[in-house]
Image: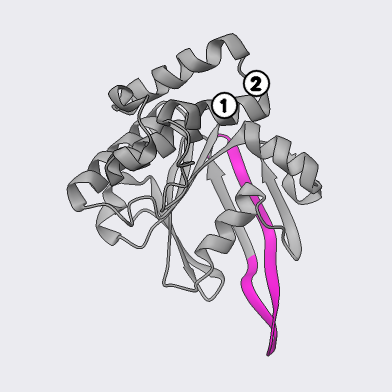
Amino acid sequence: METKLIELLGVSKAYDVAAGKFLALKNVDMQVGAGEFVAVVGKSGSGKSTLINMITGIDSPTAGEIFVAATPVHDLDQEQLAVWRGRNVGVVFQFFQLLPTLTVSENIILPMDFCGVIPARERKERAFALLEKVGIVEQADKLPSDLSGGQQQRAAIARALANDPPIIVADEPTGNLDSHTSDAVMQLFSELAAEGKTVVMVTHERDLTRFFTRSITLADGAIIRSGNE
């Protein structure tokens, strides 16, 4: 890996449950290079979502260190994490999470308003350019409810790109899409990786592995396989 953009060193995550401690991640070591398109796969409960929550700073490790673009994410407090995440990580969810009362373009402008990285006078133009990039610029002034599932996911990808983050993290982004739409969305992620974005995606769909640089397989909170499949 020429440039290690993401590095996890001995990362464990324990949760308190009725029976005591539950180890969701167990001493995980992991590296992702700049421009990689990495799948995180495994059965339900294997630790996939916990792993990406570590990378995005949504959750913090019980033990270990997490470095993203040389930033020690494990050392940041909640306020610092919010600022760091807004500028460095774009997150795409399975259920889109678009705000229903805002138009599609307004949904994309909102992260720019929060972070202040993009000058105010450029934000609307950038939103339309991103919608053009993902192929739905004609939907810019519609509400999310007026869009199909595939169009909403494309809008969510455009929103994740709003502040031009180096990393895109996606959690089952094709889980609610038909196979044809899934392929189109996956092709879009592949193009982003080819342009230099680093994409880490949780998926349970094995037939999508042709799109990835490599796959990381989790079982019971531990990485059991990492490489091309």
63 displayed left or right of 131:
right
Residue 165 in view: no
81 displayed left or right of 123:
right
Q: Is residue 173 above or below residue 146?
A: below
As drawn, the residue found furthest toward the left would be 180
Question: In the image, which disc is placed on residue 117?
Answer: 2
Residue 222 locus on image (x, y percent)? 56, 70
Question: Are discs 2 and 1 less than 8 Å apart at CB?
Answer: yes
As drawn, the residue found furthest toward the top would be 121
Q: Residue at x 72, y 35 (%)?
A: 83
Residue 41 locus on image (x, y percent)? 42, 62
Quadrant where the C terminus sits is bottom left
Which corner quadrant of the image does residue 187 belong to?
top left
Please report whichever mark, 2 or 1, sits nearer to the chain's N-terminal start: 2
Q: Which element carries disc 2, helix, strand or loop?
A: loop
Q: Residue at x 58, y 35 (%)?
A: 3
Marks 2 and 1 sit apart, C-alpha to C-alpha, by 7 Å
- Whether 155 is among the magenta residues is no
The magenta segment: 1-27
Prevailing secondary structure class for the magenta stretch in the rendered image? strand
List the residue tagged with mark 1: 163
Q: Residue at x 57, y 49 (%)?
A: 31
The residue type indicated by label 1 comes to Asn
Query: How many C-alpha atoms fall within 10 Å of the one at disc 2: few (<14), some, or many (≥20)?
Result: some
